[in-house]
Amino acid sequence: MTLDGYCDHTAVMADDELHAHYSNLINGADLALYGRITYQLMEYWKGILANPTGDKLTDDFAVSIDRIPKVVFSRTLKNVDWSSARIAAQELRKEVLTVRELPGKDILVCSRSLIAALINHGLVDELQLAIHPVIVGKGLPLLDLIGEKTFLKLERTKTLASGAIVLYYRFR
């Protein structure tokens, strides 16, 4: 996310430290939830997996993103061709309630609209925001779809060499 609150992966620099951070996050989770648009953006990493860049942390991230099971929520996609992905069998709330009952690690919510919907349903335990030191002035706001005032408690922070700050919040 940019400093002014927009989701724009093209506005930030994804350096080795950021790739390592997200590889660790993904490796500590059991499932990633995607909307169609974000899922299709992430398919980029299948190409890196097939043709590694030679940059260890970038290539490791491709392995991590390939490994984690993915559930895609879409009204238009009928199937996906990534072996670790599947189309959601139920609507978002029911699907998440079902997978939350299973034993395992964390469930990552990787799309803006899904984050907002699950916060609105009270189904998010932790919100991690990586705020990058760039102002873009326009774009897709991250939190504009939240339905009502929501209080959070800052648990910890992590500062990256790029100047990005990762904020870890718990919902009260």
Image: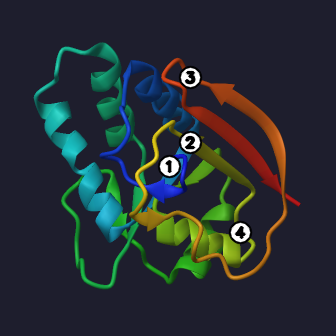
Q: Amino acid at mark 2?
A: Ile
Give SS at disc 4: loop
Say whether disc 2 or disc 1 marks the residue closer to the N-terminus: 1
Say whether disc 4 or disc 3 marks the residue closer to the N-terminus: 4
Callout 2: 10 Å neighbours few (<14), some, many (20+)?
many
Spatial CA span between label 4 and label 1: 21 Å
Residue in the picture at 76% in, 48% down:
169
Say whether disc 1 or disc 3 marks the residue closer to the N-terminus: 1
Residue in the picture at 16% in, 21% down:
53
Spatial CA span between label 2 and label 3: 10 Å
The foreground one among 76 and 16 is: 16
As displayed, is residue 108 above or below residue 28? below
- Residue designated by label 2: 131
Spatial CA span between label 4 and label 3: 28 Å
Callout 1: 10 Å neighbours few (<14), some, many (20+)?
many
Whole-percent x and y of residue 91? 50, 83
Say whether disc 4 or disc 1 marks the residue closer to the N-terminus: 1
Between disc 4 and disc 1, the foreground one is 1
Give SS at disc 3: loop
- Residue designated by label 4: 123
Quadrant in which residue 105 is drawn? top right
Give SS at disc 2: strand
Residue 133, label in figure: none
Give SS at disc 1: loop
Between disc 4 and disc 3, the foreground one is 3
* Quadrant of the image containing the C terminus: bottom right
Quadrant in which residue 15 is drawn? top left
- Residue designated by label 1: 1
Residue 160, label in figure: 3
